[in-house]
Image (cartoon, rainbow, N blue to C red):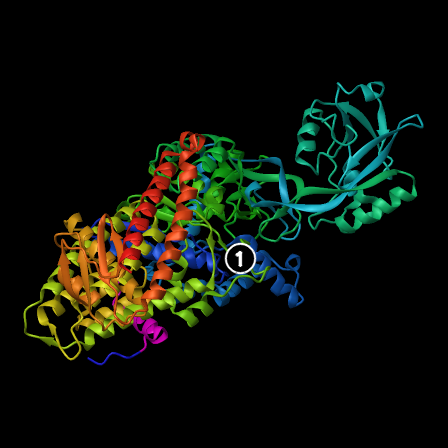
Amino acid sequence: MQISEKYNPQETEQKWYSYWLENKYFHSEPNEKPPYTIVIPPPNVTGILHMGHMLNNTIQDVLVRRARMQGFNACWVPGTDHASIATEAKVVAKLKSEGINKSDITREEFLKHAWEWTDKYGGTILDQLKKLGCSCDWDRTRFTLEDKMSEQVIKSFVDLYNKGLIYRGYRMVNWDPEAKTNISDEEVIFKEQNGKLYYLKYKIEGTEEFLSVATTRPETIFGDTAVCINPNDERYAHLKGKNVIVPIVNRVIPIIEDDYVDIEFGTGALKITPAHDINDYEIGKKHQLKMIDSLDDDGNLNEHGLHYAGKNRFDVRKQIAKELEENGLLLKAEDYVNKVGTSERTGAVIEPKVSVQWFLKMENIAKPALDVVMDDEVKFYPEKFKNTYKHWMENIRDWNISRQLWWGQQIPAFFYGTGEEDFVVAENIDDALVLAKQKTGNDQLTVNDLKQDQDALDTWFSSWLWPMSVFNGLLDPENEEIKYYYPTSDLVTGPDIIFFWVARMIMSGLEYRKEVPFKNVYFTGIVRDKQRRKMSKQLGNSPDPLDLISKYGADGVRVGSLLSAPAGNDLLFDEELMVQGRNFMTKIWSAFRLINMWNHEDKPANVADKQAIEWFDNKLNKTILEIDQQFEKFRISDALHLIYKLIWDDFCGWYLEAIKPNYGEGISKEVYDRTVIFFEELMKLLHPFMPFQSEEIWQLISERNVDEALVIAQQKKAGAFNEAIIKNFETAEDIISGVRNYRQTKGISPKEAVEIYTGASDFENEAVIRKLANVSDIHFGEKTDKPSFTFLIGSTEISIPLSENLDLGEEKIKTEEEIKYLKGFLISVDKKLSNEKFVANAKPEVVDSERKKQKDAQDKIAILEEKLKSL
């Protein structure tokens, strides 16, 4: 067979991916096999593949492909998330570029534009995942805003409302002025910012005295309704019960007392602005203070801002500081670094804002979801994330599930009047009308009298149902698919959404199916650059995965990224890893070409061949067992390292060398056939990691029909192995390496045969040693008086008489230098071991290591001194 000299990834990848799709190898239907199910963490519908996606989806694909090859009915459900805030922001920006404001069009018109946008740009990332080799069941692709998915979201809202778990109320929320919606606490990212701490003068009513109050946000004074002091602060005892005048605003407000105030911070006096600070809001409720909201939804001052009305909050901050100073109302301004809450999606500085929102009570549904993780019913890998999860779940707050957006599932609450309780919750307007008539006793009501809540649900309120909703589990709880595929097997995700998504999926799974949604959660690390910075478009430090695939091949990129992706730890990206991945592909291709170049002859296997076959068969079985153990612990990088070493070192480096026929000769057909079987087993082990090249080689090894493709071939189970056979061959490798080291350091040609003297009575794998080390004679149980190169394998001494071509005088000098170095090294080790404190306090394994160094040095010095005598 003519095998091309170079492997062509681009040509191969397109060919085999089309073949896999055409033959529906990725498609799954319930059957008699045990299921293995993964649901994809749905990327944003408008997203594009980045390094984090690449790592996460490569790991999922490895797990799915391996499960398929181990006899499971593997089902990987792909899909995208409608990403309400991110997508709506893009559509709003597009409309603005066309001269259209969202506020000037109806919801229906806006949604028409949003769907057009989604149809045009959505799903790009799924096509990009195909280039990576992802073996998703594309027939099952879901979108969180498609009809069936939305129906399930609405159904769950109504159900939870009827159970008393969802309520509507006034609360302080995190307002994103750019997205013009509130966001949850988990979507607020706190960042350190350089600012100023302003000390303002609040005049005490009826006196010329001032009370100094420190604030980082002077623009919020328009919402001040009190100044608060600590009741134990003696400095202000004389001000109790008095009032102050808010600077510029000239509003009279009371001085109140509360233990919340830190006497040591700032001046010990706090301005209280209940509408613009969460802590002030709580104090305001406690002391029944008036609430004045002085900011509009855009983050501009409203009519309460007097002459600053309509101006941006940050512009006002600068201008008001100037006005305060001019009026003698600013005591001083100091540089100050504080943590400011920003929106995860838009980056805008969030504003605390009081508004009417919908909330889901979390306390009762969080407890069972905490228990199943702490009891390992759902296992976390790495386990350290259990503590993170526990802390959040034990301090959980009610989930604010409403968003002031149009792109999303519209909240199914229908208002029939203007009162706060004049609404009903139903799955559709017809059901709502029935409920409204019952509630009001007014049979004259029509659907025209009902108005649906304008808000949409938080995106996470749809994706928390994902493992169930993709199988239609809420609309048809007893359907064949949900009963077969749920609970899913493994979830692969990032630790950054442990609260947003992982915790909430566990809650909803227990609530609706009384079962956990998955058995294992594998947390990937964050992809960082060599400076340990998180990769991002803003920093410009993130390569395009598609460019890497084009350059190194999908297999090279997959292997390169996984080689340095330890479970739960960050991946330090280095393009050299991709080079390593590509080099691995080249090594495998070269090995395949070498085997195919050999002529096979009808002759028996020789002794070296038999020894190599026996060893590799045992080594293969042992490695398969070790790979299985690593997968059980989700140590996927470690499993790949085992396969990498088995192929590169053991198969290519030792096995093929041991069986390689002499120049001009052919290989025994018996050995060739066994070698091909070994190579096929290696391709099966490799396939989950390098699907394209392994399938190409598999199909070239032998003509296969559609039922024999590698993608559905079954991996070999670990068989019995003899550890002694493996160890004995490793000893042979050490002896061969020792002889090769002699040749290399002394400049002796590999073609020049050598003889060996040894105290050993025999060598296991003697035929392999003779062949690979080019040894003519082995003198067992003998010493030699000839000048020799001597080395130890364990406690066995091996000597090679020096070639006549060597300069013995130069060899003597080198030997003396080596003895001198070793004696110096031995002195340092002896000093350590004679130090009683070191021996008493160091770990036993450290002391043992030093003792081994001491003995090795002593043994080597003895050998070298003998050598010096012979020289």
In depth, the one of 607 and 375 nearer the eye is 607
In depth, the one of 237 and 642 nearer the eye is 642
In the displayed orientation, state which residue is furthest to the right.
Answer: 208
Q: Does the magenta stretch include residue 16?
A: yes
Helix, strand or loop at disc 1? loop
Question: Residue 232, position in %: x, y?
Answer: 75, 18
Type of amino acid at the residue the image marks with label 1: Met
Q: What stretch is highlighted in magenta?
A: 6-25
Q: Does the magenta stretch include residue 870?
A: no
Quarter of the image with the N terminus is: bottom left
Residue 656 visible, this angle: no
Disc tally is 1
In depth, the one of 402 and 110 nearer the eye is 402
In the image, is 718 to the left or to the right of 481? Answer: left
Residue 868 visible, this angle: yes
Query: Which residue is rendered at x = 41% and y = 53% of the image?
Result: 565
Q: From what the image shows, is residue 618 above or below residue 286? A: below
Question: Residue 69, position in %: x, y?
Answer: 23, 57
